[in-house]
Image (cartoon, rainbow, N blue to C red):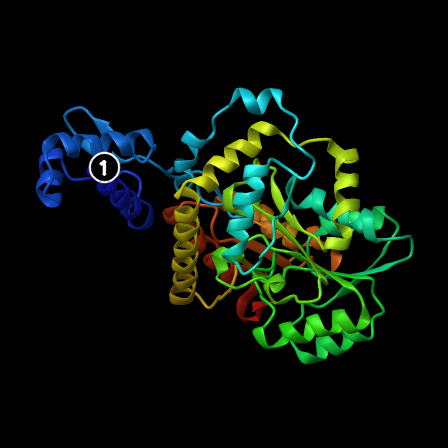
């Protein structure tokens, strides 16, 4: 329909270029600009209103509706800004089927097929198991593969939830630096590990990615030394780097895809691709662990994947991340290739957290990753609205000038 085409294009402009409170053209002006009838122009704004993107005020006009002004700017969480999630509402429908059906342990079949198509765009030709986020997938894989005393290499700093899972299963966690050189590969080759846990692209918290010229070497070491690589992939679509799993020809990579950072942590659904030889044991363990995931949530995500909305959302998220990375490069001395900015300061991170909170910005102290990182802070680039992000960057920049002097360095 004509009005929907115009509305979707205008929605894209709102999400990419406009700010809360910006005034939109009047109905007559919009009709003239787009060469459409007044009725069609009214339908455009009605459609955008139902999406939550605009609000009409009697006698004043139509304005961009999303966002907030003032208050604490949250740069601690890693999730999309609210204004990029307003499209989700119509997909959050409760169906009777989702209420009265136990889905198979591997997941709701239409969702699995759609997820397989999604992963195919990333170069991964597999139909995944549907899990309750990456946490459940990590637990099931660890339960299936690890025995007491096995060594698991984990990047430091890195996801502490994975460390706790492996340690709870009796494994010995071996911290390793993020893989960024041939020397790192040589050290890994000597390590005698059973498993490597890694975020090869868009690493949290450092924002780094394993260089392209090291990836085949890493896979070859895994094959020769016979260990598995667990690839945790929260944001490959957004950072624009193909997952390691797409290069895996010997089934040494166990791929885990969480949607928490793309759609928000409240949607506890993830995808897992495991080697064929492990598939039966993982399904058996999953059935024991939870019997069946929420049918309602699985059908909501299925509806999102079946539409074009999620694909468009990821495009907008990617563009937004690039815009904010460019803003950092233009206005500060900081750079990052991922969704986080990770920096070292001269004062303990807990002091920085309290001081910045007083100034109106919430950040993550580095010591949540261990005492070794107690002088690092982590900032999430995507969570605030763009105007709040720019305001927060200025606040952090001014604060760091006062407490670190010229000694501020990046990780």
Residue drawn where x is 73% and y is 32% of the image: 290
Residue 398 location in percent, x, y? 46, 58
> Which quarter of the figure has residue 326?
bottom left
Left or right: 411 as drawn, with respect to 394: right
Residue drawn where x is 29% and y is 50% of the image: 17
Residue drawn where x is 56% and y is 23% of the image: 97
Residue 280 versus residue 46: which sits nearer the camera? 280
Residue 380 location in percent, x, y? 52, 52
Determine whether 59 is above or below 121 in the image: above
> Which quarter of the figure has residue 10?
top left
Determine whether 316 is above or below 341 in the image: above
> Which quarter of the figure has residue 42?
top left
Question: Quick one: which residue is furthest to the right in this view?
Answer: 148
Left or right: 79 as drawn, with respect to 86: right
Left or right: 156 as drawn, with respect to 112: right
Q: Is residue 344 visible?
A: no
Within 10 angstroms of label 1, few (less than 14), some, or many (20 or more) residues? few
Quadrant showing the N terminus? top left
Residue 315 versus residue 207: which sits nearer the camera? 315
Residue 187 location in percent, x, y? 77, 75
- Can you identify the residue that label 1 sits on? 1
């Amino acid at each position: 329909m004509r009005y929907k085409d115009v509305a979707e294009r205008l929605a894209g402009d709102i999400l990419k270029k406009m700010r809360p409170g910006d005034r939109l053209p009047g109905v007559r002006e919009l009709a003239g600009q787009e060469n459409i009838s007044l009725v069609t122009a009214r339908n455009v704004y009605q459609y955008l209103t139902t999406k939550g993107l605009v609000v009409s005020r009697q006698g004043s006009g139509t304005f961009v509706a999303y966002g907030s002004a003032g208050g604490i700017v949250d740069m601690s969480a890693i999730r999309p800004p609210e204004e990029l999630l307003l499209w989700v509402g119509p997909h959050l429908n409760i169906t009777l089927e989702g209420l009265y059906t136990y889905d198979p342990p591997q997941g709701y079949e239409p969702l699995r097929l759609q997820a397989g198509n999604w992963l195919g765009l990333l170069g991964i030709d597999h139909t995944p198991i549907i899990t309750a986020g990456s946490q459940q997938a990590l637990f099931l894989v660890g339960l299936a593969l690890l025995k007491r005393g096995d060594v698991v290499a984990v990047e430091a700093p890195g996801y502490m939830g994975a460390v706790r899972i492996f340690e709870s299963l009796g494994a010995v966690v071996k911290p390793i630096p993020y893989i960024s050189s041939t020397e790192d590969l040589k050290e890994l080759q000597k390590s005698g590990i059973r498993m490597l846990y890694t975020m090869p692209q868009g690493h949290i918290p450092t924002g780094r990615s394993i260089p392209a010229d090291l990836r085949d070497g890493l896979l070859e070491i895994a094959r020769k030394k016979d260990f598995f690589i667990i690839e945790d992939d929260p944001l490959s679509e957004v950072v624009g780097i193909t997952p390691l799993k797409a290069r895996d020809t010997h089934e040494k990579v166990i791929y885990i895809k969480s949607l928490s950072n793309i759609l928000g942590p409240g949607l506890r659904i993830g995808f897992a691709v495991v080697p064929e030889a492990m598939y039966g044991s993982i399904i058996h363990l999953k059935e024991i662990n939870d019997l069946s995931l929420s049918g309602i949530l699985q059908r909501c995500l299925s509806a999102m994947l079946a539409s074009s909305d999620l694909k468009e959302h990821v495009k907008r998220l990617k563009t937004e991340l690039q815009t904010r990375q460019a803003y950092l490069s233009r206005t500060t001395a900081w750079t990052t290739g991922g969704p986080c900015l990770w920096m070292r300061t001269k004062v303990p991170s807990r002091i920085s957290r309290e001081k910045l909170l007083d100034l109106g910005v919430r950040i993550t102290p580095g010591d949540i990753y261990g005492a070794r990182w107690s002088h690092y802070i982590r900032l999430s680039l995507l969570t605030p609205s763009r105007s709040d992000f720019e305001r927060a960057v200025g606040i952090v920049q001014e604060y760091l000038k006062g407490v670190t002097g010229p000694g501020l360095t990046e990780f």
